[in-house]
Amino acid sequence: MAAARQEARAEQATADREIVMSRVIDAPRELVFEAFTEVRHLSRWWGPEGFTTTTRAFEFRVGRVWDFVMHGPDGTDYQEWISWTEIVPPERIALLHGEFRGDPNAFESVLTLEPDGAVTRIEMRTVFPTKELRDEAVERYHAIEGGQQTLGNLAAYVTEVNRKGVEG
């Protein structure tokens, strides 16, 4: 009971700095988790619609990084850097995401994967260092729409992989 109250207070303390989104994916949790573990998977679905990625370095281990460039449909390149801070297969991934190592504006994201029969419920909770950075991400970079599109791309990718696996 005390832990639940403490968690509720922590969520209230970050509410103005966070974005929370979720999606149901028609694939087993282990497959959804696997989509984060290798570049060959990530490059197929990561990012909003119309974006592609070029990976410079990738190691899916706590303390290691994914260093990449997202290429926007308008030709703009976005330098990106993710450090994995917690990995609990197949249920949880926590990461720090910025433009470069040591980025003072980096944000934290926690992805939680819950099985629900044959489907997986994924929740992505992102907390920014300040309310202003969160608002800028939403207004200037369309973070909510982009996050929803990214989860949609993940869902489409793993659903297709799962379908092929079942048929194959």
Image: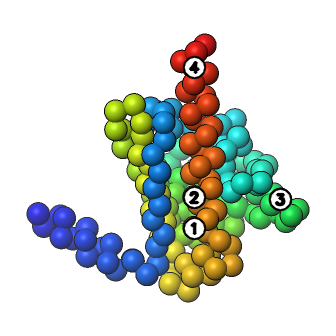
Q: Position of residue 92 (x, y in %)?
A: 41, 47
Circle 2: is it few (<14), some (14-19), or many (20+) Cα within 10 Å? some
Circle 4: is it few (<14), some (14-19), or many (20+) Cα within 10 Å? few
- For numbered disc 2, what is the local secondary structure? helix
Earlier sequence position, callout 3 versus callout 2: 3
The kind of residue tagged 2 is: Gln
**At x 50% / y 84%, what residue is drawn?**
131
Location of mark 1 (residue): 144
Q: Is residue 6 left or right of residue 121?
A: left
Location of mark 3 (residue): 73
Q: Is residue 55 visible?
A: yes
Report, in whole angstroms, how far the alpha carbon at label 3 lies from the one at label 1: 18 Å
Report, in whole angstroms, how far the alpha carbon at label 3 lies from the one at label 2: 17 Å
**At x 43% / y 81%, what residue is drawn?**
16
Q: Eyeballing the image, is 32 above or below 125?
A: above
Q: Is residue 66 visible?
A: no
Earlier sequence position, callout 1 versus callout 4: 1
Circle 1: is it few (<14), some (14-19), or many (20+) Cα within 10 Å? some
Earlier sequence position, callout 3 versus callout 1: 3
Q: Position of residue 160 (x, y in %)?
A: 61, 31
- For numbered disc 3, what is the local secondary structure? loop
Q: Position of residue 106 (x, y in %)?
A: 58, 71
Q: Eyeballing the image, is 35 above or below 76?
A: above
Q: Would you say the residues marked 1 and 2 are in contact, meaning their CB atoms lie under 8 Å apart?
A: yes
The kind of residue tagged 1 is: Ile
Quadrant of image for the N terminus = bottom left
Location of mark 2 (residue): 148
Numbered tag placed on residue 165 in the rendering = 4
